[in-house]
Amino acid sequence: MASVWVLRRATKDGSTRFRVMFRVGGRESANRYAGSFPTMREAKIRRDWVTAELAARRVPDVSVLAQAPTSPTLREIAERWAGSRVDVSENTRLEHRSAVRAMLPALGDRRVDTITPSDVAELVAALAAKGRRRETIRKTLLAGAMVLDFAGIVTDNPFRDRIAVRLPRENKTEIVPPSAEHVLAVHDILPERYRLPLLVLDASAMRLGELQGLRWGDVDEPRGRWRVSQAVSKTGHGRWVPVPPALFEAVLDLVPREDRTPERKVFQGFGGDRFRTAVTRACIAAGVPAFSPHDLRHRRISLLHLGGVPWARIGEHVGQRNLAVTANTYSHVLVDEAEIDYEEVLR
């Protein structure tokens, strides 16, 4: 009976090699050599190939493998995949870039056809050890799965394995939206360039990426509103956002009318990551409970709900299509129900 096995051999320099051997028949058949490898993983890949050849009643010809082109590395195929994603928004493109960057230190130089579910599981463990959150790791796995799908040479995508690859357990933290007093305390400490964006996020329930992508071509001055375009909306559906008059006038004063070209961003030079950092530092300096820009969205939706606005109307206002998700995710018991007098703050 044909057989294949792996031998462990020590070399003269003290390192270890793994030699793959096989027979095409019983014990009377001669042992044949199928390659030597520095790792057991590579040896097992060759062993499995030899096994498949023998099962197909073919004599394994190792010379065919020597002539076969090698598969690209994860780093190479990820770059090509990113360049092919002309169907996504700029915000999604940035998310993909961040997700891919997280996996490259561990797997970037690996050939895509040698990555196994155990490799991906080790990646998950390494990211969790670095303090990456469950949702961040999930996005990294999703990006890795799409990269290997794009490669088209992996039969069983290891990033989609649900037996070996598990997301880390994470206890959900209770979200406590900031009070009006806390928002104003942070507002007074923030650098001047971040104060108006903070108030706009509090009043509009916009996502940070939506504010960052807002352009003058989206501003409807006669009606005191602006449009969250499909290109920057997380859901891919545009919507109109009404803005309190005092804030709307303050935004219009940022740029002279003659300079408001349609493609120019309203908050020129505004960066979401820097803004998040500035808010965190201001919370510490003000001695108030830490909150994120997205917590302002939670605060506004909760205030709308407490004000008697129907969930359907709230969903339209904030760009949430699933009303159940909106109700379950964004309704909170607020520390206070006070509104901010934006006109007074901007004086």
Image (spheres, rainbow, N blue to C red):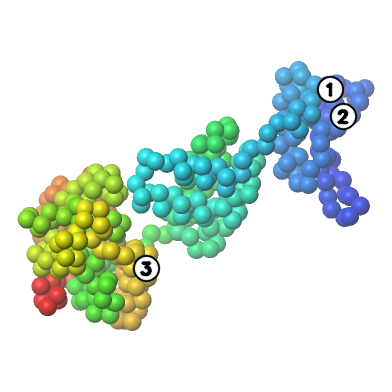
The residues tagged by marks 2 and 3 sit, at their Cα atoms, a distance apart of: 62 Å
| Horizontal and vertical percent position of residue 183 | 23, 73
- Residue highlighted by disc 3: 274
Residue 197, quarter of the rendered image: bottom left
Residue 327 can be seen, yes or no: no
Residue identifier under label 2: 32
Mark 2 or mark 1, earlier in chain: 1
| Relative to 313, residue 184 above or below | below
Q: Could you tell me if the residues under marks 1 and 3 are in contact, i.e. CB atoms within 8 Å?
A: no
Q: Secondary structure at mark 1?
A: loop
Say which quarter of the image contains residue 36.
top right
Residue type at numbered disc 2: Arg
**Split into 4 quadrants, where in the image is the C terminus?**
bottom left
Which quadrant of the figure contains the N terminus? top right
Q: Position of residue 35 (x, y in %)?
A: 81, 36
Query: Between 276 and 232, which is closer to the camera in this rendering?
Result: 232
Give me the residue at 21% from left, 76% from top.
184
Q: CA distance from mark 2 to mark 1?
A: 8 Å
* Cα distance in 3D space between marks 1 and 3: 64 Å
Q: Position of residue 224 (x, y in %)?
A: 9, 58
Which one is nearer the viewer's eye here, 183 or 99? 99
Please identify the residue farthest to the top as the structure is shown: 57
- Is 109 placed left or right of 79 in the picture? right
Q: Which numbered circle lies on residue 24?
A: 1
Horizontal side of 55 relative to 99 (left or right) equals right
Q: Quadrant of residue 8?
A: top right
The residue shown at (73%, 38%) is 44
